[in-house]
């Protein structure tokens, strides 16, 4: 039991951190807040991560109910989520900004700090469709496992958003030491891990939907 919880904890934490991608969110944050004074930048970092966390936790806790409301099985959502994450992972491997997380940065460069914090930083850059999908699927697994597993999912979400906030408030220090080459290398590695996680989501969804595939 303890070994299963540890495995689940590692999978959950790595999945959420990879899909949130704090480094990418920080680089977009730097681009969008260029020219702002330090106080305004700090406000954007705080508001964007706070709103992203609220959305992420809300879907993690109520995602199952939302799926039930629309008559969607968790197996179907798990398979669809795996396909979505696979696409995001492929874009990361090829060093592209995922369209499911971010549209053209230039579109938002002239809007107010409050609006930047919500769109595009909180949604869809930090908490996008991929992040929500991951949280809902992991929470469904956690509910079948126990209270500790549920706590693991919630704590992983808080940790991922906390890392993002820390990187944002230290963005100048980070960007001075990370070049485009290093960023692409890290992004590709994370993309490969995300692809593997996505494939596992699909495999688990197919096994649950079609027990014969699992020899049941």
Image (cartoon, rainbow, N blue to C red):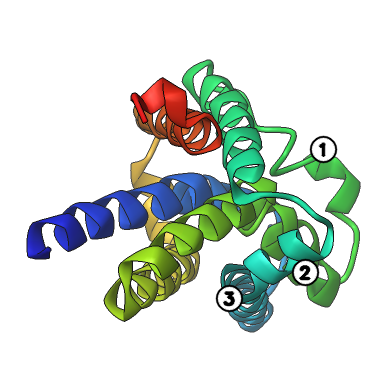
Q: Residue at x 84, y 58 (%)?
A: 70
Image quarter where the N terminus lies is bottom left
Return the x and y of residue 154 as percentages of the image width and height: 43, 74
Pointer 3 residue: 61
For residue 212, which quarter of the picture? top left
Q: Is residue 166 left or right of residue 96?
A: left
Q: Residue at x 64, y 76 (%)?
A: 58
What whole-number distance in Å separates the C-alpha atoms at marks 1 and 2?
Answer: 15 Å
Between tags 1 and 2, which lies in front? Answer: 2
Pointer 1 residue: 104
What whole-number distance in Å separates the C-alpha atoms at marks 3 and 2?
Answer: 21 Å
Give the vertical position of 104 relative to 159 (above or below).
above
| Crowdedness near tag 2: few (<14), some (14–19) or many (≥20) residues, C-alpha within 10 Å | many
- Residue 118, labelled with which disc? 2
Mark 3 and mark 1 lie on one chain; the one further toward the N terminus is 3
Q: Residue at x 64, y 65 (%)?
A: 64
């Amino acid at each position: 039991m303890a070994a299963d919880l540890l495995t689940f904890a590692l999978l959950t934490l790595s999945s959420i951190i990879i899909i949130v991608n704090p480094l990418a969110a920080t680089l977009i944050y730097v681009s969008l807040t260029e020219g702002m004074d330090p106080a305004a930048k700090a406000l954007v970092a705080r508001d964007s991560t706070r709103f992203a966390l609220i959305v992420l936790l809300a879907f993690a806790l109520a995602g199952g109910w939302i799926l039930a409301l629309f008559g969607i099985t968790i197996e179907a959502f798990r398979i669809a989520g795996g396909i979505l994450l696979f696409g995001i992972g492929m874009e990361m491997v090829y060093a592209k900004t995922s369209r499911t997380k971010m549209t053209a940065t230039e579109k938002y460069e002239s809007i107010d700090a409050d609006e930047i914090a919500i769109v595009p930083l909180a949604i869809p850059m930090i908490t996008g469709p991929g992040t929500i999908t991951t949280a809902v699927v992991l929470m469904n697994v956690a509910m079948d496992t126990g209270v500790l597993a549920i706590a693991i999912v919630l704590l992983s979400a808080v940790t991922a958003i906390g890392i993002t906030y820390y990187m944002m408030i230290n963005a100048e220090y980070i960007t001075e030491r990370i070049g485009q080459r290093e960023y692409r290398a890290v992004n590709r590695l994370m993309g490969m891990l995300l692809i593997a996680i996505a494939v596992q989501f699909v495999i688990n969804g197919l096994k649950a939907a079609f027990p014969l595939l699992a020899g049941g």
